[in-house]
Amino acid sequence: MQHQVLINTARSLMAPGKGILAADESTGTIKKRLDSIGVESTEQNRQAYRNLLFTTAGAEEFISGVILFQETLFQKADDGTPFPDLLTDKGIIPGIKVDMGAKPLAGSPEEKVTEGLDGLRERLSDYAAAGARFAKWRGVIDIAEDRPTDYCIHVNAHALARYAALCQEAGIVPIVEPEVLMDGANSIERCEQVTDAVLDAVFTELKRQNVLLEGMLLKPNMVISGKQCPQQAGVEEVARATLRCLNRRVPAAVPGIVFLSGGQSDELATAHLDAMNRMGPQPWALSFSYGRALQAPALQAWRGQADNVPAAQQAFLKRARNNGAAARGEYNA
Ligand code: 13P
């Protein structure tokens, strides 16, 4: 019974032509985003910004789910409706970020391990009661000459699987997000090698910890050149390398893969997803779970001014529509 609930939620999140809006920026991250448009990060401004996104008419055609930060899960829209109810009424599934962030890894302090397992069972039951039907946990792996270590990959994979098992016990679909960062100077080949090792470790742990693959989603990075790398791989090459890596490591039982954008420009994130879907069919549905690549133009258009809300909503809707098209392999730049 519980299995069927998980499977149904995962399938609904992967509805054709739809993807996920990651609006789960932690208090620190949303402050950075709001700072960039000269808006103070008060609870009221954070509510106003999320209200703008979630009340965008028509976005539900392209958005199947929204990942919320804990504060937002318990906030209300301008009309007094709790945000999870507002989303549910539009046919959008509310989700929740449950990790407590990436912290320095003891014994290898330049690397990080994501915390938040203690008390997670209890928190999940509170989040489910508030309307959350799926969750997210992000492990962070960076690339340098001597990183990542096996140790870092292993502890992050282990934590991701522990989180996933706890979510499924609570009837919540886990989005498993092992993010290999794209900030370095590494080549696309090195990104592929590291992503391969990370996915291998993650699926080994998921199996060991009895996670139902049919009742989860994977949120990986794309296989891409590091931002500082002088040689930037083109769209086709990124699409081919990403698909090759995923086909080697992700079992076909996983219903869907939703990519993070990770600092790619919004246009490129859309083009990459589109190219992969044009190379289909693949064993799993391929869509998006973008934060920055869905929100950046809306944030710029808004700038904290109520008068700018319609323009910001238009900008968000455009990104949602284009990524919805890319999820079908029908995007025309
Ligand atoms: P970006 O698409 O901005 O990488 O955010 C997605 C996300 O949820 C990262 O955890």
Image: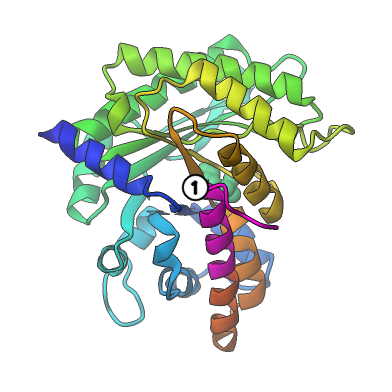
Q: Residues within 10 Å of mark 1 (few under 14, many from 20)?
A: many
Answer whether residue 168 is visible to the viewer in this image.
yes
Q: Is residue 74 magenta?
A: no
Q: Is residue 208 above or below residue 55?
A: above
The foreground one among 152 and 243 is 243
Q: Say whether mark 1 is within 8 Å of ligand 1.
A: yes
Answer whether residue 155 is visible to the viewer in this image.
no
Residue furthest to the left = 1
The residue where tag 1 is placed is 289
Residue at 79 percent across and 25 percent down: it is 187
Q: Which secondary structure dominates the residues rendered in magenta? A: helix
**Seen in the image, is 31 located left or right of residue 84?**
right
Give residue 27's position: percent from left, percent from top: 50, 56
Q: Is residue 65 above or below residue 315?
A: above
Q: Is residue 300 above or below residue 138?
A: below
Q: Magenta part of the protein: which range? A: 316-333
Residue at 45 percent across and 67 percent down: it is 59
Q: Is residue 331 magenta?
A: yes
Quadrant placement of the N terminus: top left
**Dot 1 amino acid type:** Ser
Quadrant placement of the C terminus: bottom right
The foreground one among 320 and 2 is 320
Residue at 42 percent across and 76 percent down: it is 57
The foreground one among 199 and 113 is 199
Secondary structure state at the residue bearing disc 1? strand
Residue at 19 percent across and 31 percent down: it is 169
Give residue 201's position: percent from left, percent from top: 48, 14
